[in-house]
Amino acid sequence: MTRTARELLETTAGELAPDPGANPLVPLIARGGADRSVLTALALEQRWVIPADRRAFLRLAERAGPEPAAYFTALAEGEALAAEHLRTFTAACGADEAHADAYTPLPGCQSYPAYVAWLALDAEPPDAVLALTANFSAWGGYCASIAEALRTHYGFGDEACAFFDFFAEPAPDLDRLAVQVVQTALDEGCLDENRAHRYARLLQAYEAQFWATLGEHA
């Protein structure tokens, strides 16, 4: 039986969902056991990730047809908004601009945006849509846990938590765009499911490496 785009997206996300024990850092933050320096490092690493991902999404939009371009443009716009929220979170962590500018990012944390940049150059846009969408569910769940912990255990206000709230919230318009792109690609026979699945698996691996590296640093 032929799968619909939504079924394919949901199945891929489910197959690649990380093991609950694979990321010990987020549960540590969730129960208030992480030092505040870990939160600062998280903010400073994301200061490198967010603009890199935004540029990668814009590059994918340039290479894509109208439907995928709309999806990637929406992602880029989201990253721009997230960057504003990230400045507030970084400041709440006690890192001023001089501190942030002097920070040297950790290679293991930056492998994820480096791979997204590779996708921007080499992946077929519909394949990248499937891979990225499958990865976002795990990231959104982590952000929801961190946002709650920041309020409950670390005394952060709503403005300081907005970066994580933004990614934790459902994005129905973005989901709708992803379904449209994948469905069109399926209908036209231009989606390589195996290749997209490999891209998604690598994204999940680099996501796990981000948290593992940050945890080791802590």
Image (cartoon, helix red, strand yellow):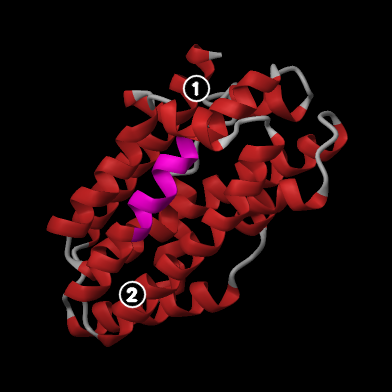
State whether residue 27 appears in this view: yes
What numbered label is drawn on residue 214? Answer: 1
Q: Is residue 175 magenta?
A: no
As drawn, 179 above or below 75: below
Q: Which residues are magenta?
A: 45-54
Residue type at tag 1: Leu
- Side (left or right) of 172 relative to 32: left
**Residue drawn at the location 69% of the way across and 18% of the way down:** 34
Q: Nearer the viewer, mark 1 or mark 2?
A: 1
Q: Secondary structure at mark 2?
A: helix
The residue carrying mark 2 is: 182
Q: CA distance from mark 1 to mark 2?
A: 33 Å
Q: Are marks 1 and 2 in contact (CB under 8 Å)?
A: no
The quadrant in which the C terminus is found is top right
The picture places residue 183, in percent across and down from the top left corner, at 34, 80
Numbered disc 1: secondary structure: helix
Q: Main secondary structure of the magenta part?
A: helix
Which of marks 2 and 1 precedes in the sequence? 2
Quarter of the picture holding the N terminus: bottom left
**Residue in the foreground of this view, choosing between 196 and 121:** 121
Relative to residue 83, is residue 32 depicted above or below?
above
